[in-house]
Amino acid sequence: MRHTSTNLYGASSVSNEKSEDTVITAFKGFDANMRCRGFQFKVGETFEHEGQVKACVRGFHSCENPLDVFRYYDPGVSLFAEVEASGKIARHDEDSKIASGRLHVKAMISLPDYIGRAIKWVTDHCNPATSNHADADKAASSATGYSSASSATGDSSASSATGDSSASSATGIAAVAMSIGRYGRAKASKDAAIVLCEHDDDGKLLHIRASKVGDNGIEPDVFYTLQGGEFVKSDVQS
């Protein structure tokens, strides 16, 4: 079923749209009733916007990077879905957010699966332009428990730590270090990435962020934690 919107956000503006022939796989957040700014969405249905398309103003919005959605929707109380954006496309200058003239809601994604998608997205996008290690073995390490530690060494390796005050580190091209427990910290080498979660004292998930080393002020081989949704160097570096 197709649905039509003429002016999703009730505003007029000069459009920065362009037509793209491809279908863009992206991710979208909703409130608990599967609405976005009052507009009702449904799984398996396609929505069309008539008129100009402009990021943050008009059209149907989604993000190519799953983690960017958390800037707009609280992970603790929101719903998330994989979507397909097509038709007129307008891109946001500050992140991977796009506005589209057509949006198909493909499937809902649970928060754990969503985090997995986010890690894959970061891994897929943190490969350097040139590499002599394309065929390197992939390593994986995980640790659960208070003050636990996990580390992985090798190209395309992954390290995860889920306990409170846990630490995760990863070394190698396209490696990912993830710490998702309370007060967790993570570090990674050059050409790698980190993923961190922030919780309140009751354990409610507040923020999830990921970054390649070299972006967002992230330095190689330095432990970071999240405070107020922002990356901060950890007081503990061992």
Image (cartoon, rainbow, N blue to C red):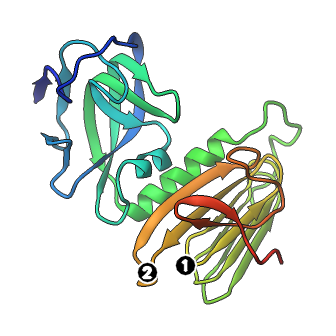
Res 150 quadrant in image: bottom right
- Amino acid type indicated by mark 2: Gly
Dividing the picture into quadrants, the one containing residue 61 is top left
Classify mark 1: helix, strand or loop: loop
Q: Which residue is mark 2?
A: 203
Question: In the image, what residue type sits under mark 1?
Answer: Arg
Q: Does dot 2 land on a helix, a strand or a loop?
A: loop
Q: Using the rendered view, name the quadrant where residue 42 is placed.
A: top left
Q: Are marks 1 and 2 in contact (CB under 8 Å)?
A: yes
Horizontal side of 138 relative to 117 (left or right) equals right
Which is nearer the eye, 64 or 224?
A: 224
Label 1, label 2: how far apart the Cα atoms are: 7 Å
Q: Nearer the viewer, residue 145 or 31?
A: 31
Q: For residue 182, which numbered disc appears in the image?
A: 1
Q: Residue at x 64, y 39 (%)?
A: 125
Q: Position of residue 184 (x, y in %)?
A: 62, 75
What residue appears at the point 67 percent right and 47 percent down from the top-left corner? 216
